[in-house]
Amino acid sequence: MDGNRCGWVGDDPLYRAYHDHVWGRPVYDAKELFAKLCLDGQQAGLSWITILKKQQNYEQAFANFDPAIIATFDEIKVAELMTNAGIVRNRLKIESIIRNAKGYLAYTASGQDFSTFLWSFVGGKPIVNRFSSMAQMPSQTPESEAMSKALKKLGFNFVGPTICYAFMQAVGMVNDHLVDCMVYDACCRDHQVRD
């Protein structure tokens, strides 16, 4: 795939593939959204490419982000994860994934859908922006602030408004590809596929 890409993409083939095929494409599966939210939380203070390169390691370490399994992780498991060089060995970040799994399970135990909950912050459909430069892109929005507050009420952490906005961009709740980006139109089409 060749053409203009958004300015944040470097030359790394993994980063390019992520930009071209993942970032900005709408995700509706609740467990996939949970996984992406947890991974975005791991990014705090780091570059996204750092986490992207460790994604498979995270999937192995955290049972493919199955909340029911993660919620059973105890201190012994945390200590084991702290020795795993394939992930970011930060106790607070490791514990946040466990905490988020418990929040997810508590929310869905009442029969509520986590995907519907997250998508409600953008009215159930993607916000399609028309930015021509990176400078126009916000780091957070009223929608990401509302999502952050609601997630914190559910017991989640590492879900500040900036992390929530990065998450919303990644899962296609907003299309922040620049208008001259080669995948901008494809993401717009993806946004129209779902009712």
Image (tube, grey):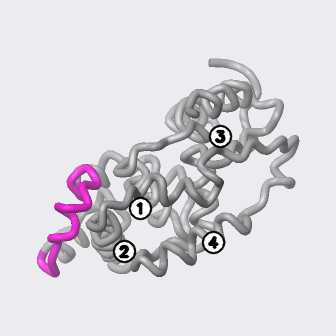
Instruction: Give the quarter of the figure containing the C terminus.
Output: top right
Q: Quickly name the residue at label 3.
A: 10
Q: Position of residue 101 (x, y in %)?
A: 30, 67
Q: Quickly name the residue at label 2.
A: 96
User: How far is mark 1 from mark 2, CA to CA?
Assistant: 8 Å
| Circle 1: element type | helix
Q: Is residue 45 magenta?
A: no
- Sequence-first disc among 2 and 3: 3
Residue at position x 41%, y 62% from top? 38
Query: In this orientation, which residue lies closer to the viewer: 76 or 29?
Result: 29
- Sequence-first disc among 1 and 2: 1
Going by the image, does 25 lie left or right of 58?
right
Three-letter amino acid code of the residue under disc 4? Ala
Going by the image, does 69 lie left or right of 12?
left
Residue at position x 58%, y 65% from top? 163
Q: Tags 3 and 4 in contact by the CB under 8 Å rule?
A: no
Segment colored magenta: 61-76
Disc 2 crowd rating (10 Å Cα; few below 14, some 14-19, many 20+) is many
User: How far is mark 3 from mark 4, CA to CA?
Assistant: 31 Å
